[in-house]
Amino acid sequence: MVKMKLKKKDNILIVGSGVLGAYLAKELKNNKNNIIITTRQLKKKYNNFKKLNIQSKVKFVKLDILNKIQIKKIIEKFNPISIYYFAGQSSIIKSYKDIKGTVDSNYIGAKNFLTIIKEKNLKTKFFKSNSGYIFKNNKNKINLKCKFADTQNPYVKAQINAYKIVKSFRENFKINSYNIVFFNIESPLRNKNFIFLKACLAAKNKRKIYVGNLKIIRDFSWAPEIMKGLSYANKIKPCDLIFGSGRGMSIRELIKKIFKYEKLNYSKFIKINREFFRKEEAKIMISDISLTIKKLKKYNWKPKIYRDKLIKKMLNSL
């Protein structure tokens, strides 16, 4: 009788234990990989992973992303085939109050990983998450040819610098590095201060909602669907990719639809709060995902959950 050799599982490192890291871990775990999550501080509970029923199926390790010695040790220990960098202070408003923390987490940490991959001459694939806000406000859809935003915001500036260095390491040192640009990715695990979940909870509980500019248009997508697309990106050559729904919706339309789904008149529940208006706020942010769809054509990836379907998904998940 011939014994069949079991295929060795690949190690994948996800830097950051936030919402997107949890959804990506679930997707990658479905592919029978070993998933290692790095976190600033080890805890007994990781709520995002617990809610997705994968806390016991992944390994958590403590890591200071500013400590290159720690990064080296973790890379040497696990020898990951892929590293997904999801760490970073992600609030545009909070970034003004913590400039150093924003720059360190979004730029310096990523640079440290890239430098070590280069020094050790590794073939490891490095994916850096980024924000669609790095690109200039555009009446048309945003693609990779758009100019960078002209801004003084610490978060956006740090993300632009991170985008540039990821591309630089790929082009100048042949590092397998990818820029992954995300637009608004929604899920029931999303921070309750973000408008989509905030509006859903207000409608569910029949309570008032305080909002800012209702005229701005945003691109909202479904987290599990986007993370599935990202898992396919691991199978293509290093490049830059945009992930979103490719559709836009104004904040007014979004709130109106959410409350209508609950058979409520949104106008009776909204209150405008001028404190939520931002000076540099882009009026229109819609992703052009045509290149991503083309590159992932072999895997038949294309977002199907957006607008009304996304609203239904969100409300039914609460």
Image: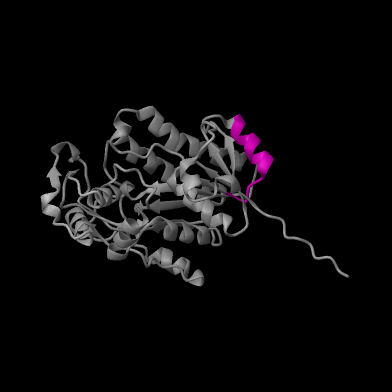
Residue at the spot 59% in from the left edge and 35% down from the top edge: 71
Instruction: Kindly identify the residue that appears in the image at 42 percent across and 46 percent down.
Output: 163
Q: Residue at x 33, y 46 (%)?
A: 134
The tally of labels here is 0
In this rendering, does residue 62 appear at all? yes
In front of the other: 41 or 136: 41
Direction left: furthest residue: 268
Q: Quadrant of the N terminus?
A: bottom right
74 left or right of 292 in image? right
Kindly indicate the quadrant of the structure image that contains residue 154.
top left
Q: Is residue 277 left or right of residue 88?
A: left
Q: Is residue 76 magenta?
A: yes
Residue 89's x, y, as percent? 39, 36
Up the image or down, 237 lies above or below 206; here it is below
Magenta portion: prevailing SS class: helix
| Left or right: residue 227 compared with residue 151 | right
State how the image is colored.
one colour
- View extreme (right): residue: 1
Residue 189: x and y in percent read: 39, 47
- Seen from the viewer's position, the closer of residues 160 and 67 is 67
Which span is picked out in magenta?
A: 69-82
Q: Is residue 280 magenta?
A: no
- Residue 209 relative to residue 45: left or right: left
Q: Position of residue 246 (x, y in %)?
A: 32, 63
Position of 167 relative to 230 (above/below): above
Q: Is residue 166 visible?
A: no
